[in-house]
Structures are given as C-alpha cells and as structure tokens.
Image: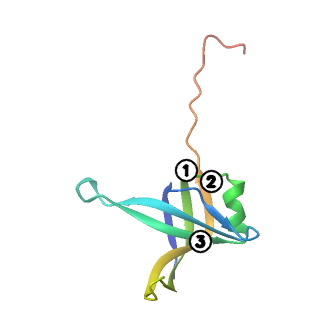
C-alpha cells in the first residue's frame, strides 16, 4: 500500500495552474527528536477537486495542514539537459488545521 499522511506548515502561497485543475504547494514537516531534529520540505501536487480545496479552505503560507496521499517519483530534464527526479505527494485529501480560539468572558453574564 502506498499511502502517506503528514501534518506540516505551508512554506509559500500555493500555486494553481491552468483552469484551476492542478495545484502545487510545499509543506515543511519536522521529524526526529530535539538533538536530531530535521525539517523536511515536501512538494504536494493536487488535481481536480483537491486543487479547488486550496481556495475553499483559504490555504496560504504559514497555515498548518493535514495532507493524505501517495508517494510518486517524477522524472524531469534540467536546463543543462541532465536527468533529475523528485519524490512528491499526489494528494487525496488536504485540510487546513485551525488554531483553537480562546474566548475569555469579561464581567458578568446576562444569562
């Protein structure tokens, strides 16, 4: 089974291409413990409905997101004509994680 789930922070505003059917964003994910802490930068690609969810959830740089999808290795040719590859996530589900809002009561209650 090829499935990956991660929670991380969006590193720059997501990009939507063409008619909005394809999207791309990068997510920073911390791994390891204090002394061996490492930040991984993961490219996530979204297609169709998932690309639309970027706008629906108003996902922008700095937001914390939940991403579920599958790992894919994409091959490409660089400008200098050498071959390259990148492992990316093809997203099945993405959700913005909202910070809890703390409501403090002031004074008495009218109830």
For the residues bearing labels 2 and 3, Cβ distance under 8 angstroms:
no
Judged from this view, the residue extending furthest toward the right is 19
Q: Are marks 1 and 2 in contact (CB under 8 Å)?
A: yes
Q: Which residue is mark 2?
A: 59
Mark 3: which secondary structure?
Answer: strand
Q: Residues within 10 Å of mark 1 (few under 14, many from 20)?
A: some
Q: Secondary structure at mark 2?
A: loop
From what the image shows, is residue 94 above or below residue 75?
above
For this view, does 18 lie left or right of residue 106? right
Percent coordinates x, y for residue 102 in the rendering:
56, 31
Q: Residue at x 57, y 23 (%)?
A: 104
Of the 4 image quadrants, the one containing the C terminus is: top right
Name the residue at 60% across, 19% down. Answer: 105
Q: Alpha carbon of mark 2 to alpha carbon of mark 3: how far?
A: 14 Å
Residue at the far left: name it. Answer: 35
User: Which residue in the protein does label 3 denote?
Assistant: 45
Q: Position of residue 12 (x, y in %)?
A: 53, 56
Distance from disc 3 to disc 1, alpha carbons, whole Å, reads 17 Å
Front-most of residues 12 and 110: 12
- Colour scheme of this structure image? rainbow
Q: Which badge, 2 or 3, comes first in the chain's sequence?
A: 3
Which of 95 and 79 lies nearest the eye of the viewer? 79
Indicate which disc residue 54 carries. Answer: none
Q: Which residue is mark 1?
A: 63
Residue 47 lies, in percent from the top left, at 68, 73
């Amino acid at each position: 089974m090829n499935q990956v789930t991660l929670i991380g922070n969006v590193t720059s505003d997501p990009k939507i291409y063409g008619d909005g059917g394809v999207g791309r964003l990068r997510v920073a994910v911390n791994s390891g413990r204090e002394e061996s802490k490492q930040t991984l930068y993961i490219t996530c690609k979204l297609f169709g409905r998932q690309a639309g969810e970027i706008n629906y959830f108003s996902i922008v740089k700095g937001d914390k997101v939940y991403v579920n999808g599958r790992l894919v290795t994409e091959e490409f040719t660089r400008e200098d004509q050498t071959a390259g590859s990148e492992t990316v996530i093809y997203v099945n589900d993405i959700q913005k994680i909202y910070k809890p809002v703390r409501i403090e009561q002031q004074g008495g209650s009218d109830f």
